[in-house]
Image (spheres, rainbow, N blue to C red):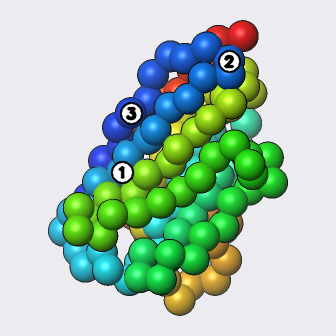
Amino acid sequence: QVQLMESGGGLVQAGGSLRLSCAASGSIFIDSLMGWFRQAPGKEREFVAAIRTSVGYTSTADSVKGRFSISRDNAKNTVYLQMNSLKAEDTAVYYCARGPYYRGSYGSASSYDYWGPGTQVTVSS
């Protein structure tokens, strides 16, 4: 059974930075697709960034490109989302997800089988 747990969320002023972590357990991490999604109140869940853990291939949504970056530490079974130059519109619950590396699009929620409970990020303007 795969378990994912996000951490690092919180309240930050616009222009600030946060780093989210997602610790994975219960499965082979070395070649997986790990993604970050977010959902703001009243909006659909949207893709933020993803990484294939074995080779480090990444994909980042246009809305956060240049401000957010995804990375991984395979030794720690952990994926990170570094968020810089945060804006009020980045306020959302951020979710970590895992799926098999070979399944479809990095940016599609259907490519992922397991999800964490989410961590709240609030950016004050």
Disc number placed over residue 8 in the picture, else none = 3
| Residue, disc 1 | 22
CB under 8 Å between callouts 3 and 2? no
Name above or below for residue 82 compared with residue 111.
Answer: above
The earlier-in-sequence mark between 1 and 2 is 2
Which one is nearer the viewer's eye here, 102 or 12? 12
Answer left or right for 57 relative to 125.
left
| Residue, disc 2 | 14
Name above or below for residue 90 compared with residue 46.
Answer: above
* x 43%, y 51%: residue: 80
Give the spatial CA distance, label 1 vs label 2.
23 Å
* x 66%, y 67%: residue: 59
Kind of residue at badge 3: Gly
Kind of residue at badge 2: Ala
Give the spatial CA distance, label 3 vs label 2.
16 Å
Q: Please state which of the two labelled residues, at mark 1 or mark 2, is closer to the viewer.
A: 2
At which x and y percent is residue 78? Answer: 32, 58
Disc number placed over residue 2 in the picture, else none = none
At which x and y percent is residue 63? Answer: 79, 46
Secondary structure, mark 1, is strand
Give the spatial CA distance, label 3 vs label 1.
9 Å
Which one is nearer the viewer's eye here, 52 or 105? 52
At which x and y percent is residue 28? Answer: 25, 79
Q: Report if residue 3 is visible in the image.
A: yes
Q: What number of labels is visible?
A: 3
User: Residue 60's quadrant in the figure?
Assistant: bottom right
Kind of residue at badge 1: Cys
Which one is nearer the viewer's eye here, 25 or 80? 80
CB under 8 Å between callouts 3 and 1? no
Answer left or right for 35 relative to 21.
right
